[in-house]
Image (cartoon, grey):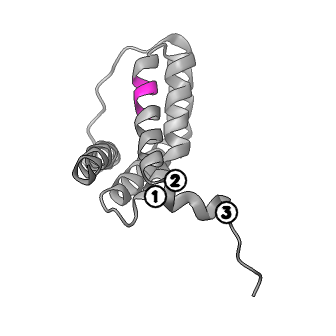
Amino acid sequence: MNKIIAVARWLYALFYAYAGASWFSHKLFATSWPDHEEAPAAKALTTALTTSGIVEPLIAAVCLVGGGLLFFRRTAPLGIAILAPLVTGIFIFHLFLNQQWPWGTFHFCYLAALAWLHRAAFRPLWNYGGSAA
């Protein structure tokens, strides 16, 4: 069972690490992203975010760091925590703007399953019982 969990974690990590690294490599080597079909509302939002110049590098960095942290069992919970806001945003984007809800739901449920499998690492966040020093 632990090997299945590790493989599932590595696949998710590989996807997000690749997504982040590929964005940086496209910028480094001055190549363009392939165009794909988007709903008008989704296109307006992505255009605005791209034009800002800060959102895409931030998303790529979060993907790269979060995916990199997921490769290792010890840092997997931190990777999950780092990717959670991004994946939630992806879920909401695909659910409401792009009308591709299976894609966003898959990413969200996959991360939720990983968080559940690593729930012991998150227990101190909810059950803090230490005394002040």
Q: Does 52 sit above or below residue 62? A: above
SS type, badge 3: loop
Residue pictured at 41% horizontal, 47% vertical = 60
For the question of whether residue 66 can be seen, the reply is yes
Numbered label attached to residue 77: 1
According to the picture, the residue beneath numbered tag 2 turns out to be 81
Q: Is residue 72 left or right of residue 57?
A: left
Magenta highlight on residue 55: no
Q: Residues within 10 Å of mark 1 (few under 14, many from 20)?
A: many
Spatial separation of the CA atoms under disc 3 and disc 1? 16 Å
- The magenta region covers 103-107
Q: Is residue 126 left or right of residue 17?
A: right
SS type, badge 2: helix
Q: From the top left corner, tell me how far across and down residue 84 is, in percent.
A: 52, 45
Spatial separation of the CA atoms under disc 3 and disc 2? 17 Å
According to the picture, the residue beneath numbered tag 3 turns out to be 127
Q: Residues within 10 Å of mark 3 (few under 14, many from 20)?
A: few
Location of residue 34 by image quarter: top left
Magenta highlight on residue 106: yes
Residue pictured at 56% horizontal, 43% vertical = 85
Q: Residue furthest right?
A: 132
Main secondary structure along the magenta-highlighted residues: helix
